[in-house]
Image (cartoon, helix red, strand yellow):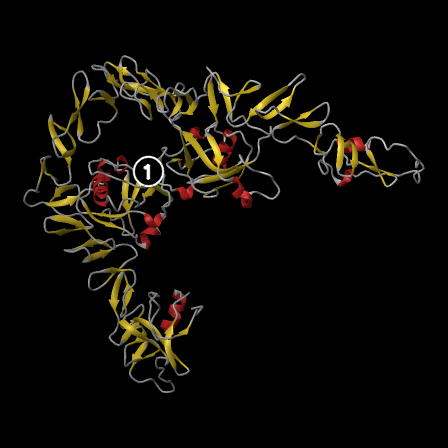
């Protein structure tokens, strides 16, 4: 019983655990020993004893020589194997492997005869037979293969498998009668699964560019992005066939598991070619172009299209022509209804209408609803820029503003401009002119204040200056930056469109290598990349680009940093408002540190919050040496004080030759006190000012500099204190050539 059981199972082929180990107790020693004239099935005679055959042998004449096999095994060269080799089949009566008919690559035995399941090269499988040609039927030959000199692949084949041709080699696709290679660009496991399955093989074992040599001619496919579930590789998103960008050093090589059935029908006769293939003039099934779901007569003569393309008389295209819409189910361009000039999704979902009908956003109507305005051939809820609403007895019509007027309206039946285009000024009469009237100056208008949202901005750390900063775009309710890839080659046209969309002057500077302060401004998205404008677009996203959120290898160090010229959109005012100063005929913004200024950007009369006013009318975050803070002002210290606090004579350090005694600077120290001079052994060299330079140290008779690695502001405060100076303002990284005496200092300050 155990022998029969073991004969039906492979050694180790079980799902048992050691909690299921067999336990056995025998009654005593073997009492069945006897002399026989024949050993019988399952044994062979050896040295006057009967020895057991291998477990899968029914009869044998030696330990490795089977004469007849048990069920589910076949005899070949006196071995019992579970499956016969290529070109042979297992005879279920004799349990022996026999040769297939000469034209078969693989075959199986039926009740009455042997039938071919696949054919030798040059033969076509037709039902149960292999034939020389398919006569009136079409012949199919696999259009994907793994090719190459398989004898050179042994180094790549796993030691625990016997994977040889045709499951290993250079991946090639036959198109229009020629074999082409596939590029390894973005090629991953899901792509490999689709190719192995399409060839009829098992799962992929290995894949790599250049793994099995290089091909010739054009490379058919690159940038594949399969999900692994596609029926054919042509269904996978990928770049245009034969597009440039790869070399034959990137040709993909693969190893696939053998098919579960043990064979693949590589060539066969078919009544009709499958979808994605067409019947050629030679009665062969050939691959259609990747745009075609079906084609006829030639690879590009599509009769239906793959997603996301639509079929029309012009072939397969992403968009349908005017008067048609893309039907998702049929993947075809179908005509719009009679009232529609253009439509989308369905024939009756119009997007423009045949005159005199008007489009109200969903339908074609004879007149606009009461809550909408008539603009051209459409009904709108807002006339938008460069238009005003003219209410008549029968309708509300959007009329065009005068030339050079961005925003206008009616005042007692007279058209009055409220905002003029860049390069023009708004007069008090509501007209656009080139200059302001006498007694007026130009004032830049922030378009947001008059209800215009450009959906882009220049963001910076300069207190809200809108002329300079990182270019950011608002999309999907999120602000994101613009990558500078390709911007360098189209910088002027790109910047011109961006500045115009911001209603500012033409571009002044396009920066690369954004300042670290700007980089520190948090932003998560990069919205646009490879922007290419011609200068005529109304919005930066109207220019050619890689698509929203498609930014490849960009990071925020590649963000575009732009400066537009002042003043942009302007109006005329009699005097500059708070926060601006008059510069000849124009009001310009004060520095962000000032709330008010006079005559120049930094000549501040009042400071912003967090800043202190200095005697030279600048605003600073920290008063300079020799000053103290009082009521948002920097007040001068007493003449002998180098630094002071709270009051002018409350000294915290002294100028030379004075010494600090308490909070007073004296020439001579009082009795019982001593003069403490600057500590020897440390000083500033290469000075750029009295309190700024490179730290030089003298120690044990040697002089050198301190290494700046890991140096922090806390360390700087200690050094400044040792130099008898105030706190550290900055710690710089410099390159000098003196000997380094101190490395990696760490101070607690």
The x and y percentages for residue 260 are: 60, 30
The residue that appears at 6% across and 42% down in the rendered structure is: 437
Report the number of numbered marks: 1
Q: Quick one: quadrant of the C terminus?
A: bottom left
Q: Return the residue at label 1.
A: 546
Q: Can residue 519 be seen by looking at this rendering?
A: yes
**What is the crowding at mark 1: few (fewer than 14 residues within 10 Å), some, or many (at least 20)?**
some
Q: Is mark 1 on a helix, strand or loop?
A: loop
Residue furthest bottom as drawn:
671
Q: Residue farthest to the top?
A: 338
Asked which quadrant contains residue 38, the reply is top right
Left or right: where does residue 220 sit relative to residue 119? left
Can you give x and y, in whole percent of width and height, for residue 675 in the image? Answer: 35, 84
Question: Against 208, is 293 above or below?
Answer: above
- Of residue 127 and residue 471, the one placed in the foreground of this image is 127
In depth, the one of 406 and 82 nearer the eye is 82
Q: Which residue is drawn at 17% across and 27% down?
A: 388
Name the residue: 29% across, 60% down: 621
Nearest the viewer among 602 and 713 is 713
Along the line of sight, which residue is nearer the eye, 109 or 547? Answer: 109
Is 312 left, or right, of 71 in this rendering?
Answer: left
Q: Where 685 falls versus 277 (above or below)?
A: below
Locate the N terminus and report the quarter of the image it occupies: top right
Q: Is residue 335 above or below residue 444?
A: above
**Horizontal side, residue 423 vs residue 62: left or right:** left
Residue furthest front in the image: 102
Q: Does residue 468 show up?
A: no
The spot of residue 264 in percent (x, y) is 55, 28
Position in image of residue 601 (x %, y %): 18, 55
């Amino acid at each position: 019983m155990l022998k029969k059981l073991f004969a039906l199972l492979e050694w180790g082929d079980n799902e048992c655990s050691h909690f299921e180990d067999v336990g056995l107790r025998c009654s005593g020693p073997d009492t069945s020993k006897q002399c026989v004239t024949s050993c019988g099935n399952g044994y062979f005679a050896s040295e006057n004893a009967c020895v057991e055959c291998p477990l899968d042998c029914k009869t044998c004449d030696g330990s490795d020589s089977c004469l007849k096999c048990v069920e589910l095994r076949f005899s070949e060269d006196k071995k019992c194997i579970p499956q016969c080799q290529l070109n042979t089949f297992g005879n279920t009566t004799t349990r022996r492997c026999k040769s297939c008919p000469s034209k078969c690559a693989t075959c199986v035995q039926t009740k009455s005869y042997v039938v071919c399941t696949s054919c030798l090269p040059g033969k076509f499988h037709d039902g149960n037979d292999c034939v020389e040609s398919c006569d009136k039927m079409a012949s199919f030959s696999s259009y994907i293969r793994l090719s190459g000199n398989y004898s050179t692949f042994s180094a790549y084949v796993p030691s625990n498998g016997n994977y040889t041709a045709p499951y290993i080699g250079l991946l090639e696709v036959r198109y229009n009668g020629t074999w082409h290679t596939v590029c390894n660009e973005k090629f991953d496991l899901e792509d490999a699964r689709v190719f192995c399955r399409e060839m009829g093989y098992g799962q992929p074992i290995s894949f790599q560019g250049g793994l099995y040599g290089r091909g010739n001619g054009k490379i058919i496919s690159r940038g594949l992005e399969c999900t692994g579930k596609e029926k054919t590789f042509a269904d996978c998103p990928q770049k245009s066939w034969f597009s440039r960008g790869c070399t034959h050093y990137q040709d993909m090589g693969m190893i696939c598991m053998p098919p579960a059935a043990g064979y693949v029908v590589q060539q066969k006769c078919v009544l009709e070619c499958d979808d994605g293939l067409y019947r050629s003039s030679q009665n062969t099934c050939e691959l259609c172009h990747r745009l075609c779901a079906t084609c006829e007569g030639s690879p590009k003569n599509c009769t239906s299209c793959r997603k996301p393309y639509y079929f029309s008389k012009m072939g397969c295209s992403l968009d349908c022509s005017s008067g048609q819409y893309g039907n998702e189910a049929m993947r075809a361009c179908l005509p719009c209804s009679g009232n529609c000039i253009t439509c989308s999704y369905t024939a009756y979902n119009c997007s423009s209408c045949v005159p005199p009908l008007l489009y109200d956003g969903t339908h074609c109507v004879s007149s606009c609803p009461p809550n909408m305005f008539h603009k051209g051939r459409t009904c709108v809820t807002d006339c938008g820029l460069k238009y005003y609403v003219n209410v008549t007895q029968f309708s509300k019509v959007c009329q065009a503003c005068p030339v050079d007027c961005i925003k206008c309206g009616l005042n007692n039946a007279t058209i009055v401009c409220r905002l003029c285009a860049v390069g023009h000024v708004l007069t008090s009469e509501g007209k656009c002119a080139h200059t302001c009237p006498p007694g007026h100056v130009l004032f830049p208008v922030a378009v947001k204040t008059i209800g215009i949202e450009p959906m882009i901005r220049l963001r910076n750390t300069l207190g809200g200056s809108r002329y300079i900063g990182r270019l950011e775009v608002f999309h999907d309710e999120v602000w994101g930056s613009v990558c500078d890839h390709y911007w360098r080659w189209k910088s002027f046209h790109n910047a011109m469109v961006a500045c115009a969309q911001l209603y500012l002057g033409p571009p002044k500077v396009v920066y690369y290598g954004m300042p670290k302060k700007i980089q520190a401004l948090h932003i998560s998205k990069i919205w646009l990349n490879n922007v290419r404008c011609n200068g005529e677009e109304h919005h930066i996203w109207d220019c050619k680009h890689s698509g929203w959120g498609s930014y490849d290898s960009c990071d925020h160090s590649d963000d575009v940093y732009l400066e537009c010229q002042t003043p942009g959109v302007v109006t005329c005012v009699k005097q500059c408002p708070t926060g601006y100063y008059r510069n000849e005929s124009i009001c310009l913004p004060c520095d962000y540190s000032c709330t008010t200024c006079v005559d120049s950007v930094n000549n501040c009369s009042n400071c912003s919050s967090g800043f202190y006013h200095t005697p030279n009318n600048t605003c600073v975050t920290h008063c300079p040496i020799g000053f103290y803070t009082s009521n948002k002002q920097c007040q001068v210290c007493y003449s002998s004080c180098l630094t002071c606090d709270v009051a002018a004579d409350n000294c915290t350090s002294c100028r030379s030759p004075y010494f600090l005694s308490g909070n007073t600077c004296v020439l001579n120290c009082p009795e019982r006190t001593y003069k403490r001079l600057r500590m020897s052994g440390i000083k500033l060299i290469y000075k750029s000012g009295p309190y700024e330079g490179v730290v030089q140290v003298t120690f044990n008779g040697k002089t050198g500099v301190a290494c700046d690695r890991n140096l922090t502001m806390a360390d700087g405060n200690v050094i400044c204190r040792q130099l008898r100076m105030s706190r550290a303002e900055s710690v710089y990284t410099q390159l000098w050539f003196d000997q380094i005496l101190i490395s990696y200092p760490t101070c607690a300050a």
